Amino acid sequence: MTMLDDQTTAAAPWPTAYPQGYAVVDVETTGLSRDDRIISAAVYRLDTHGDVVDHWYTLVNPERDPGPTWIHGLTSDVLRSAPLFPEVVGELSDRLDGRVLVAHNAMFDWSMLAREYARAGHTAPVQHRLCTIALAKELALPLPNHKLASLAAHFGVVQQQAHHALDDARVLAEAFRPSLHAAARGGVRLPLLECRPLTEWSDAPPRPRIGYQPSYGGGNGGPASWRPSRRRPACPYPNPGRYRADQPLMQGMRVAFSGDTSVDRDLLEDRTVEAGLHVATSVSRLTSLLVTNDPDSATSKTLKAKAFGTPVVDEAAFTHLLRDVAPAPSDG
């Protein structure tokens, strides 16, 4: 089937409006907050048809705690001798220059890169990004969810080491090529978004703007806006109770969100639902977990969480926990 697809693509004219090259990127980080840091990065350079030109990988010393090492496996000892970001920025720029940045949830990878570039006093040579989640939606791929693992499985790509930047970038590069060819065959316009570098930077994280999240679906870099909560289908799994520290999340847990998030709230809630969790609109005694970047705020949710003794984690920790949600116990 793959050979036939390639022959069909070769016989059809390639869209002239498509980019001339791509840089498939994956970064591992200490978390997802504005002051979190990149600890490893990988880039697969692809030509205009999505064929691999070369690949590159580096560790990065974040100059701080590496975060959830049980997810990415990178400890302080491993990262201590790694180069600082300013020491790799030149080689990274050479691999990004003139190419469209491709990533799975590209908004996150771009925002992390843009902040690291700003800290280093540089500007990333990237004008546009392409999110493979958005491309999968444009192609209407029959995926059970929009995880990288599901996209890879759809195209028969085998993951060797999940949560390792180089292998995640390889998997995405191998899944992006058939996606790109499918788009070319169907005359699909690629969902490119403009990359706007940071023009001002402070080492202190900016104060959150209450009631605002950057929009994932704003469209072609347009302005974002607050979107009301959406009605979601009922969670198919029973509530297993409260989250316990140092244990994985479990399908069926009720998760509430409060305050500003660095990742678009709709996207974050979509990921939560796709993982088999229930998004709760309020906090009660049945709530398993509250996710907030400002636990000391006096919102109704944080106040109720304190009153009920509901566990609280920040967005970065929650997003890493989402990568490995335990299945609901079987009835048998």
Image: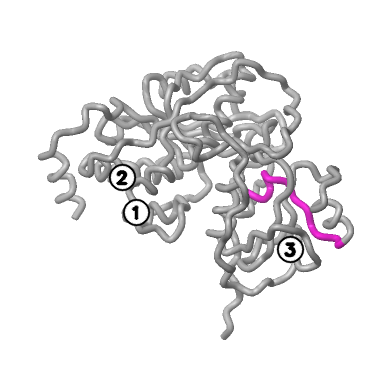
Upstream in the sequence, badge 3 or badge 1?
Answer: 1
Q: Cβ–Cβ below 8 Å for labels 2 and 1?
A: yes
Would you place residue 325 above or below residue 80 in this image? Answer: below
- For label 2, the residue is 179
Report the residue that reaches farthest toward the front.
Answer: 228
50 within the magenta span: no
Residue at image position (86%, 62%) is 308
Magenta-tinted stretch: 308-319
Mark number, residue 141:
1
Residues 79 and 158: in front is 158
Mark 3: amino acid: Ser
Residue 65: image location, x then y, percent: 72, 37
Mark 2: amino acid: Ser
Upstream in the sequence, badge 2 or badge 1?
Answer: 1
Residue at image position (38%, 36%) is 191
Would you place residue 278 above or below residue 14 in this image? Answer: below
Residue 94: image location, x then y, percent: 42, 19
Quarter of the image with the C terminus is bottom right
Question: Could you tell whether 179 is left or right of 213 in the image?
Answer: left
Q: How is the image coloured?
A: one colour
